[in-house]
Image (cartoon, rainbow, N blue to C red):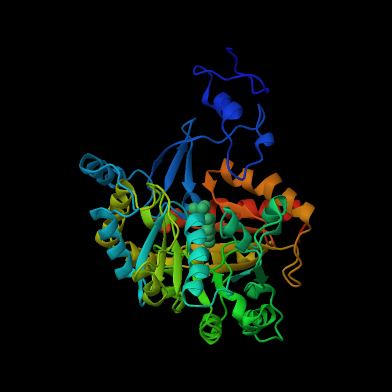
Amino acid sequence: MSTTTSEPGSKATADATLQEQARRHLWMHFTRMGEYGDEHEIPIIVRGEGCYVYDEHGKRYLDGLASLFCTQLGHGRADLVQAGAEQAKELGYFSSWSYTHPRAIELATRVAELAPGDLNRVFFTNSGSEAVEAALKLARQYHRVMGHPHKHKIIARQIAYHGTTFGALTATGVTDYRAPFEPLLSGVSHVPNTNMYRFPADHDPLELAEAVAERIEFEGPDTVAAVIMEPVQNAGGCLLPPEGYFERIREICDEYDVLLISDEVICSWGRLGTYFGSQAIGYQPDIITTAKGITSAYAPMGAMIASDRVAEPFMHGSNTFLHGSTWGGHPVVAAIALANLDAFENEHVLDHVAANAAAFRGMLDSLRDLPIVGDVRGMGYFYAIELVRDKETKETFSHEEAETLLRGYLSGEMFSRGLICRSDDRGDPVVQLSPPLIAGPEQFAEIEAVLRPVLEEAGRRMRLA
Ligand SMILES: Cc1ncc(COP(=O)(O)O)c(C=O)c1O
């Protein structure tokens, strides 16, 4: 049937516009599909170059979120994909099940060289969720192989996002994301995150680390397998750990024989200024999960990196980590990841972040004079601005106000002014910025030129002084 309607039962045809086809057939992720229609178009991004992308009407946007924290080298790097094309000519695919190929070996070696301490064993996945899934399963099987079959529980943090597959979702501490799918897996509990902006001034911040020890005691140390945390927690708005927090978490994990999983799906590959976020904060995980920037988003890939200690029991006799996927370590993707890491080195990407991070922070800090800006926090090229009703009291907005503010005004207004960033209310309302790592003063000035008037107007609309 030839029709361009988006009504159920109809089919859009090849000669319908992309808008019409998208409205009829595409199911976007974490997206209120019902909000799109004649009044409100689906944004269709058709092209990218450096820090900028262009929509189907030719309008340019600054990619202030590195898409989803992953286009580290920016857009338009056909050379990275060319490395994949060359690889495809040689060997398009072979699996990681009982076989391997040169690119997976080279990439594993390269990642292990860059990873902190004795994190030397690399297990490739296709996404961040799958990396988290692999880490949670490894933690359980590791303790089983070590003769502690009851150590299976996981401790995560409130409001943290660890992905959407069932294990990763169970570790996720965002109630709204969990509720539709309950009951989730058993044995996962959540402790407070490190929201220092709202932490009572008369308390010791290290109580937040002690909460992990208390939770392990409560669950029973013989039942706890792992703790999973991000170096800087994304959901909630770039929540930094207080001084000494991870040092104490490391001690607690050692004391109770609990593995420390550092979920660096966002916080690796230069996002915090170092290859891995745990290096920027200064702690040694037992397992790192990563994805996103490992290919600068030119192909999907994730990885779980395990320490020698954790991997060792699986390197003997018939012991096998009983986990895998068809695409994990795909040669074309591995070749793209290797080309990405070559570019990181040859183009001195981490040096660029180091040289420019203070200017990025300075620009964001300059917005603190606005009545709606309560806090600016983050590190490297990963920042959040927390929006408040009252700066003095730190009073936040009600759920309805946050909805009006973020969805009803901020997101749309920033986008229409050519800035893509994230306004988020999984915790208290924040605007997040995480540009490609090649961004510099020119892009920071453009971000400010949009943020300042938009946040000023947001304050007026919420009737702030
Ligand atoms: C910390 C963290 N872990 C896991 C994930 C899930 O990654 P993916 O979307 O690639 O499955 C994300 C995604 O943003 C993340 O931020």
Q: In this view, does 348 lie to the left or right of 445?
A: left
**Foreground of the two, 45 or 3:** 3
Q: Can residue 437 be seen in this view?
A: no
Q: In the displayed structure, would residue 68 be above or below residue 207?
A: above
Q: In this view, does 386 lie above or below 415?
A: below
Q: Which residue is drawn at 66% across and 55% down?
A: 456
Q: Which residue lies furthest to the left in this view?
A: 90
Q: Where is residue 60 in the image (x, y as percent from the top left)?
A: 47, 39
Q: Residue at x 47, y 47 (%)?
A: 62
Viewer-closest of 293 and 131: 131
Q: Position of residue 291 (x, y in %)?
A: 43, 57
Residue in the picture at 26% in, 58% down: 342
Tell me which corner region of the image, top left, top right, bottom left or bottom right, holds residue 24: top right
Position of 103 with respect to 237 (left or right) is left
Relative to 83, does residue 148 appear above or below in the rendering? below
Q: How many numbered circles does the render carry?
A: 0
The quarter in which the C terminus is drawn is: bottom right
Outermost residue on the front side: it is 318
Compared to residue 345, the image places residue 117 above or below, namely: below
- Quarter of the image for the N terminus: give it: top right
Q: Residue 322 at x, y = what percent?
A: 45, 60
Position of 20 with respect to 314 (left or right) is right
Q: Can residue 385 be seen in this view?
A: yes
Which one is nearer the viewer's eye here, 199 or 448? 199
Q: Where is residue 198 in the image (x, y as percent from the top left)?
A: 69, 73
Task: Please identify the quarter of the rendering in which residue 357 is found.
Answer: bottom left
Q: In which quarter of the image is residue 125?
A: bottom left
